Image (spheres, grey):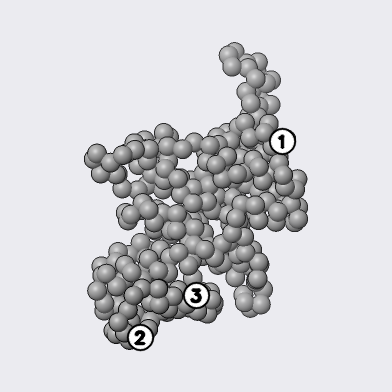
Amino acid sequence: MSADVIAELVAELGPLWHERHQRRLASRPRQRAVGAGAKHQLVFIDRLLATLVHLRHGATHDVLACWFGVDRSTVTRAVGEVRPLLAERGCTITTGLRLRTLAEVIDHLGSSGQTGIIDGTEIRVRRPAVGRKDRDKFVSGKNKQNAVKAMVLTNADGRMLFCSPAQPASCADITHARQLGLVKHLVDGPAVEILADAGYQGLGAQTGGRVVTPPHRKFKKNPPGWYEEIHERQRKAHSSRRIRVEHGIAHLKNWRALARHLGRREHMSDTVQAVASLLSHQQTSDLNPERAS
């Protein structure tokens, strides 16, 4: 990440972190005045940098503790405080405009006349302990591995617009989209074209054709040669239009925290949304001609 982006994060998140910290101190029963006692060994900018390094490079808390000269628990607490702040920022579209919910994304696509592309991505996680309730719900039906799933939505250029909270990987892509309210937002919202893969077939009929999926195969057995040629051409044309979402997911997976998550599964939603927020912010900064010059 560029130094300008980090400086913007410090200016934006620093006051929010300080406000939450003071509120947390004032909420508990105390014998001393607020602000008394031991001081932080890590200032906010160091807490932010430790979180960014952890998300970008997957550095463990033990390694970060050695780098910053503090205890591992201090780094764990710092990451746990900063990561939700990053996740709550949403995806940056332009300076001063951020999208935090799926409804806001649909409205933005409708007002700008853009096409959206959705796809699900899986992130491997640790296997739940033996005897834990619903242990098998994290097993992916596609990869046969323990994972969580998130739905990613980009525009036609691959710009990150939305990343959903993580769900156990046993949840089907189309079920996850319905749980997020995609059908309701498309039916009640503006006319928007959403490109999707075969995992979302069925949403087109529920949304009046606003979700476009690959064409169905009409001939199950012994199809004529002319039909195979037409079907393959249509399938490739659709795949070429929606390939940008795969590029967006690849940029997400470049962050080591999402290559394979070795921490607690409860933090995956904040982790994936924090990375999406940072990625969209960096993409917006790269497109800013004034900053590039």
Q: Which residue does the numbered mark 3 point to in the structure image?
A: 16
Residue at horizontal 24 percent and vertical 74 percent from the top: 71
Task: Give the CA distance from mark 2 to mark 3.
Answer: 21 Å
Where's the C terminus, which quadrant? bottom right
Q: Is residue 174 above or below residue 113?
A: above
Q: Which residue does the numbered mark 1 point to in the structure image?
A: 209
The percent position of residue 280, horizontal first and vertical second, equals: 57, 62
Kind of residue sitting beneath label 2: Ala
Q: Secondary structure at mark 3?
A: helix
Q: Which residue does the numbered mark 2 point to in the structure image?
A: 33
Residue 210: image quadrant is top right
Residue at horizontal 31 percent and vertical 39 percent from the top: 133
Task: Give the CA distance from mark 1 to mark 2.
Answer: 61 Å
The percent position of residue 63, horizontal first and vertical second, equals: 27, 69
For marks 1 and 3, give the one nearer the viewer: 3
The percent position of residue 216, horizontal first and vertical second, equals: 63, 26
